Amino acid sequence: MFSFLHAADIHLDSPLKGLEEYQDAPLEQIREAARRAFDNLVQLAIDEKVAFVLLAGDLYDGDWKDYNTGIYFVNRMGRLRDAGIQVFIVSGNHDAASQITRSLKLPDNVTLFPHRNVGTHILEQYDVALYGQSFSGRAVTEDLVKNYPQGNSSLFNIGLLHTSLNGRIGHESYAPCTLDALLSKGYQYWALGHVHQREEICRDPWIVFPGNIQGRHIRETGPKGCTLVSVANGRIVSVVERELDVLRWVACRVDSSKSETLDSLLDLVRETFQFERAGADGRPLAIRLFLEGRTPLHGQLYENALQLNEEVRAVAANLGDLWIEKVVLKTQKTHSDSVAFCGDSPIESLMKSIETLQLETTSLTELIPEFEKLRSKLPPELLIDGDPFRPDEEELSAIREEVKELLMGKIQQRRRHEN
């Protein structure tokens, strides 16, 4: 019997986004999160006495220029070598973008599969055959699976591949392939990478995206880690997800319809934060809070959005190890609070116009062509948490509602003062 670890999308030294602007943010934890998560991976491999570790692409984070990243990796591979653990890697799109990656001398317990063809590595002591092909460049658009050999019926066959499979939302279509193509190779396990959300594509045979080992922004929420696989007599006997992340991103949704006062709403927010904290196993949390539902507080929340944000941050600070990435208002008026437009005064007409305000789904690059030149010069990493130049319908709808509520709130506030 033997076991192995399958991880992917390490993105060493990739920055976490969304917390840097706060003075009380855990900046040291943010800067070192990817390394600390990788340290957890190395320690897990040693503790579990695994036979080998598989890294299915994007070990690094684009064209990194600091050799300290590579030195750190080599050092951790030395720890695995001392424990008798081999490491097998296919490079992904981010690795292929790095010049240093190509010149870095790897320890002798580390095998990097070639990019010109599919490489095969036999581990005779475990009766295992490993197959893999690295990316030759940042954008690999051809199907690499067709080059992989058929599995050896006398061995336990594992394929390593960095791929978008048949397409995944939020991920570039790199090395696309089909499930049928993977199944046709006769492998017992496919170790995939590129998709940052854990996904078990198939269980017979096992085809797994382990997700990344550390969430980097609010679109990478929930537990992050790797997959521990145990094999006996040439068959997989267990596949277990193991958590590695050191700071967790959470999207919290609070139904404000249950609150009639701001204090009661903040109490509800506090309870929600406590629930999330209890399930994080001591990890710090970075939270995006969504306030939803029909509530009589609707207008007050929009009118005092900045104050609300500070109140929520204070709630998080009192609980400790919680940081607010953003507060998003998605509340609605109660039916009794809806404005009835019955007059013909300029104020009534203006409020009616605002209530029916519509915004077309138009990108900034269409409105101002010069923005496209600016956008084209930005590194893809800056656009990973949404493209500010091309808002989608959901984002535009949120902006539209916020503008409407702010305008309505200001006018109603002015009218109350005049009366």
Image (cartoon, helix red, strand yellow):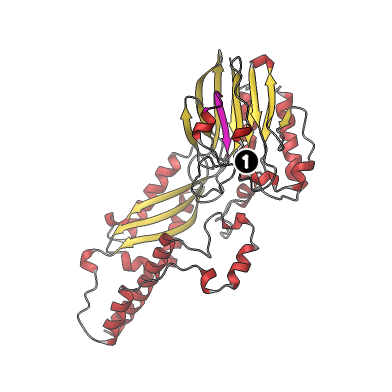
Residue at the image position 55 percent from the left and 36 percent from the top: 225
Q: Which residue is mark 1?
A: 10
Q: Quadrant of residue 186?
A: top right
- On the image, the x and y values in percent for residue 237 come to 50, 18
| 189 horizontally vs 138: left or right | left
Is 45 displayed left or right of 303 in the figure?
Answer: right
Q: Residue 246 at what x, y percent from top left?
A: 57, 41
Residue 215 in sight here = yes
User: Callout 1: 10 Å neighbours few (<14), some, many (20+)?
Assistant: many
Dot 1 lies on which element? loop
Observer-nearest residue: 299 or 41? 41
Magenta stretch: residue 190 in it?
yes
Which region of the structure is painted magenta?
184-193
**Residue 159 coordinates in the image, percent (x, y):** 60, 29
Quadrant of the image for the C terminus?
Answer: bottom left
Q: Say whether residue 126 is left or right of residue 403.
A: right
Residue drawn 60% across and 14% down? Answer: 154
Q: Amino acid at mark 1?
A: Ile
Which residue is rendered at x = 54% and y = 35% of the image? 210
Locate residue 309, reporting x and y percent: 44, 62
Is 326 part of what is drawn in magenta? no
